[in-house]
Amino acid sequence: MQRLDCLRAIYSELQRCAVVTIMGATAAELQSLGHRSNFFYLQHAMGLASSLGLGLALCRPEVKVIVLDGDGSLLMNLGTLSTLARYRPANLLHIVFDNEALLSSGGDRTATAVGADLEGVARACGIPGTATLRTVAAFRAAVTDALRAGVLTTLVAKVERSGPAQYVTGLGLLENRFEFARWLQSVRPPQANPGFQPTSP
Amino acid sequence: MSGQDTANPSRLYRNKRECLLTMPASATNAQRIHRALRACSVRLVATLPETWLVEVVRLCEQDPAMLLVCVAKEEEAVGIAAGAHLAGERAALLMQNHGLLQSVNGIVSLAQLYRIPLVMLVSYRGSFGERDPWHAAGGRATEPVLRALSIPYELVEGPEEIEPRIAATFALAESSQAPVALLLTRGLMWED
């Protein structure tokens, strides 16, 4: 299963969600399908995409948040699974593309290549919805179900060790960041938090 | 109350007594810090609780206007606060200086790279008056690391400084779109 085919299969589902990706192949492949203002590519800070998604999901319960994580990134911040499970935001879908390697930095194998089971860790931490997917059809169905179910879910998609020819795209990091914050502002319902002044993006 | 608390496993303390058992932390200054965060409309507080901060964390947790998120390791809190900011809400980090040292890549590669106003309230262990030998090395490293990262910081030593410094920290973090730190000193946080 190719990550790009998985992304293509769920691309239309992403249009109404706040999407946060990790760096490298995942960010470049999603952009190759067409950048949208609701996509944020965290081009460094490995491990923190799921934490950023948690902050978004808790502050904006009316927005569905999708985090596109990877095995290398998640292994750098495994504690995040326990934090996600503890606060359990129903509007957060955490997808882990597991290619069993640190592809973007040379392709060395990660611990999932020799048996570490990220779905098992997520389940043991208490994440209520978990699954491991090995076909594009099953992946698409699991994503659709998770978005409808409205329960915190971690999906592990086992994908090939392959990616795009290059990772740098034409989109500036800050341009992406401010555009994403403005999109979140534009979909904010009026009076959602009347006690608070929203901060500028 | 206790039945409700048991039903919510994310709560940090089952009751006030359980929290008080661990602390000679200054209760009045903790209240001042919480009040100052409230006055700044802080919506989300991300923390890894530690002895000096126990009472502040408890007050934030009990405040219905605040979302308290306890992390497993402090760098997560940088990501969570960045998410809150992008979502349009004010956030603050509450952590020990060793947590600041632990979070350096998140501070650099998320908050600084992406121009996130990150307000960090940091208990300054291993500084003057410290009696626990295990805090000594972290105490020595704290200010040099903040300077190396070009993070503006101030020490908070007196109760009357709490409210204006916290307000000033939010103002600078938001106008500069960058991390700013307050170091909470032993004299402020501890009563012995």
Image: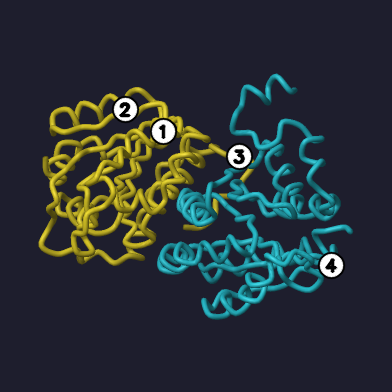
Chain colours: A yellow, B cyan
Query: What residue would you read off at disc 4?
Result: B158
Q: Chain of mark 3?
A: A
Say what amino acid the circle numbered 4 marks: Gly
**Label 2 in the same subunit as label 3:** yes
Say what amino acid the circle numbered 1 marks: Asn
Circle nearer the viewer, 4 or 1: 4
Say what amino acid the circle numbered 3 marks: Pro
Question: Disc 2, disc 1: CB below 8 Å?
Answer: no
Q: How many marks?
A: 4
**Residue A47 coordinates in the image, percent (x, y):** 38, 53
Q: Is residue A197 left or right of residue A53?
A: right
Query: What residue would you read off at disc 1?
Result: A91
C-alpha span from label 2 to label 3 = 30 Å
Query: In the rendered view, would you say A201 is above or below A99?
Result: below
Crowding at mark 2 (Cα within 10 Å: few <14, some 14-19, many 20+): many
Mark seen at residue A194? 3
Q: Residue at x 79, y 52 (%)?
A: B30
Q: Earlier in the sequence, mark 2 or mark 3?
A: 2
Frontmost residue, B138 versus A115 = A115
Q: Earlier in the sequence, mark 3 or mark 1?
A: 1
